[in-house]
Image (cartoon, helix red, strand yellow):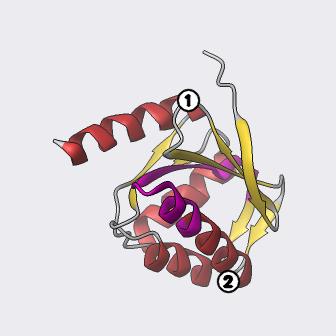
Amino acid sequence: MTITMKKIGSVPHHDLMIANAEDILIVVPESGFKDTAETSRLTVVALREYAQKLGKKCGLVIIANNLLAQDAESRRNYAEGLTSDLFFGVTMMVSSPLARAIGNVAIRLTTMQVPLSLSESIEAGIAWLEANRKSKND
């Protein structure tokens, strides 16, 4: 299945996209991006602003395949900023070995306030988020 995405915004080194649902954001870092404390803070602010303007909780698909590295402070910024009042889940798309390693570290070392998973594709990530959104609304 092919997903058609629409760009709705950007922050330094990331495009923010949506597909079929406005409450599921697809975060697309630049290829080879190294996530730092500063860039993660900017990203969290943009994601929170989007959810607040939308007026409902959002889910995130993060294209982790594009990440080359992520430092501990970045993981902490996401854990603290992606709160359950604005987000219902996060999935990291990890189809490459490096992305899977980064995703596994994020899951093991980060205590998120919302459910966090790994997915093999954008489509699988969206499906997981849709199921998670539904369970949160039941």
54 above or below 12?
A: above
Q: Which residues are magenta?
A: 48-67
SS for tag 1? loop
Relative side of 29 to 131, left or right: right
Mark 2 highlights which residue?
37
What kind of residue is marked 2?
Ala
What kind of residue is marked 1?
Asn
Residues at discs 2 and 1 in contact (Cβ within 8 Å): no
Identify which residue is drawn at 54% across, 56% down: 103
User: Is-magenta flag for residue 90?
Assistant: no
Q: Tag on residue 57?
A: none
User: Is-magenta flag for residue 60?
Assistant: yes
Closer mark to the observer between disc 2 and disc 1: 1
Q: Residue furthest top?
A: 1
Can see residue 15? no
Can see residue 110? yes
x and y percent of residue 91 in the render?
48, 49
SS for tag 2? helix
Number of residue marks: 2
88 above or below 122?
A: below
x and y percent of residue 126 in the render?
49, 35
Dot 1 crowding, Cα within 10 Å, few <14, some 14–19, many 20+ = few
81 above or below 120?
A: below
x and y percent of residue 49 in the render?
57, 68
73 above or below 21?
A: below
Relative side of 56 to 18, left or right: left
Identify which residue is drawn at 41% across, 66% down: 108
Identify which residue is drawn at 55% across, 35% down: 120
Can you say which quadrant of the picture contains the N terminus? top right
Relative side of 76 to 28, left or right: left
Identify which residue is drawn at 66% across, 75% down: 40
Q: Tag on residue 20?
A: 1
